[in-house]
Amino acid sequence: MENNPTSRCSLFSTSCSFGPTFVRLALGVMMFPHGAQKLLGWFGGYGFTGTMQYFTGMAHIPYFLGVIVILVEFFGAIALILGLATRIAAFLVGFDLVTAMFMEHVQNGFFMNWYGNQKGEGMEFFILVAGMALGLIVLGGGALSIDGACRRLRAAPPAA
């Protein structure tokens, strides 16, 4: 981070460290197929219409919240991969999956369903996602992020 105290408060500030970059890319790449399934029907998904039918009919999620989930998972993943508005994207993706954890997975216990011997997936994956999202909220997008490039451009002295 810059030595300027006001830059530390910026929503788009970040360090040049590669640690947050790896976390950001892992979270974004992991989330992209989920969002693409829901929005576009890629990766064996049902697309927007099928996903919304499930959300509103089976899961009883209000229509506007279903739309938000789909948009967050798709565009939030892209924003994370690019390092664009990383803190906002990480918050939204983290909130999305923590909500899913409490709505659908807490009752299945802690562990993932590795051996198919429980009703559904547990919470461990969602806890990892929450930790990754919190790390990005605190640290920003790191090196090789659009946020970092914008910070460097703002900090550059004006050309003479």
Image (cartoon, rainbow, N blue to C red):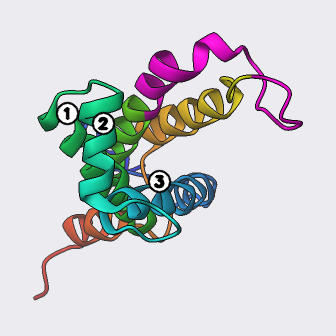
> Which of the 4 image quarters holds residue 4?
top left
Residue to which mark 1 is pinned: 65
Q: Secondary structure at mark 1?
A: helix
At label 3, the amino acid type is: Ser
Q: Range of the magenta residues? A: 97-118
Q: CA distance from mark 2 to mark 3?
A: 38 Å
On the image, the x and y values in percent for residue 53 come to 26, 44
The total number of labels drawn is 3
> Which image quadrant is residue 109 in?
top right
Q: CA distance from mark 3 to mark 1?
A: 33 Å
Residue 51 appearing in the image: yes
User: Which residue sits furthest bottom?
Assistant: 160
C-alpha span from label 1 to label 2: 9 Å
Q: Earlier in the sequence, mark 1 or mark 2?
A: 2
Q: The residue tagged with tag 3: helix, strand or loop?
A: loop
Q: Is residue 92 above or below residue 24?
A: above
When the figure is inspected, residue 6 is found, relative to residue 44, above or below; the finding is above
